[in-house]
Amino acid sequence: MGKFIGGIIVAGMLLAASLTTASAQSVEDVNGRIESLLGGSDTFAAAFEVLQDAVETQDKATVASLVRYPLNITLDGRRIAIAGEEEFVARYDEIVTPEVVEAVTSQVYADLFVNADGVMFGDGEVWMNAYCTDRSCAVTYWLVRAINIPE
C-alpha cells in the first residue's frame, strides 16, 4: 500500500511538472500568437513598453494617446463612453484605478494572453488591439480598446 501511494504521489508530481512546463510560453511564442491572430507583432512590443511606462509614471497624456475612442467603460455601475483624449485625461483617476495600474505595470510580456479579441493585460483589466492604417493593413498601430475597471 505504501508503494502504491508513493507511486501516485510521484506520478502526480511529474504530471504537475509537465503541465507547468507545457503551459509556459516565451516572448517568441507570444509574438507568434500576436502575429498569427492580429498582425503587427513587430510594433506591439514598443506599444507594450510605452503603455507600461506611461501608466507607471502617471503620464496621463501619453496613456490617453494610446486609447481608441470612443472608449466604453463602466463607472459606478453605469456604462459610459469616453469621447476623446481630453475627457480621458480629465477622468484619468476614475479610469486608471490602482487595480488597472497594477495589471498594466506588473504584466510580464511572456505571460500575455492573446486571442482574436486582442492582447490582455492582467485578468482582463486592459485589452490592446492592432488597427490598420489603410485597407491593405500593411501597417498597423496598437491602441487600448478596453479598460475593465474592477469593482
Image: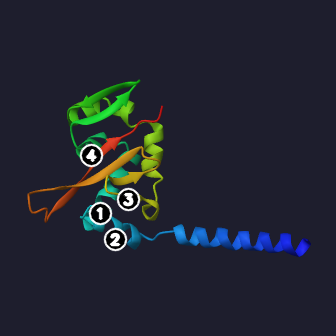
Whether pointer 4 and pointer 1 mark residues with C-beta atoms closer than 8 Å, the reply is: no
The residue labelled by disc 4 is 62
Comes first in the chain, label 4 or label 3 = 4
Residue 32, label in figure: 2
Looking at the rendered structure, the secondary structure element under dot 4 is helix
Q: Amino acid at mark 4?
A: Thr
Q: Calculate the distance from the C-alpha at mark 3 to the C-alpha at mark 2.
A: 10 Å
Residue 102, percent from left and from top: 48, 45
Looking at the rendered structure, the secondary structure element under dot 3 is strand
Q: Is residue 124 above or below residue 36?
A: above
Whether pointer 1 and pointer 3 mark residues with C-beta atoms closer than 8 Å, the reply is: yes
The quarter of the picture where residue 65 lies is: top left
Looking at the figure, which quarter contains the N terminus? Answer: bottom right
Instruction: Identify the residue shown where x is 48% and y is 40%.
Output: 99
Residue 103, percent from left and from top: 46, 47
Disc 1 crowd rating (10 Å Cα; few below 14, some 14-19, many 20+) is some
Disc 2 crowd rating (10 Å Cα; few below 14, some 14-19, many 20+) is some
Residue 55, percent from left and from top: 37, 46
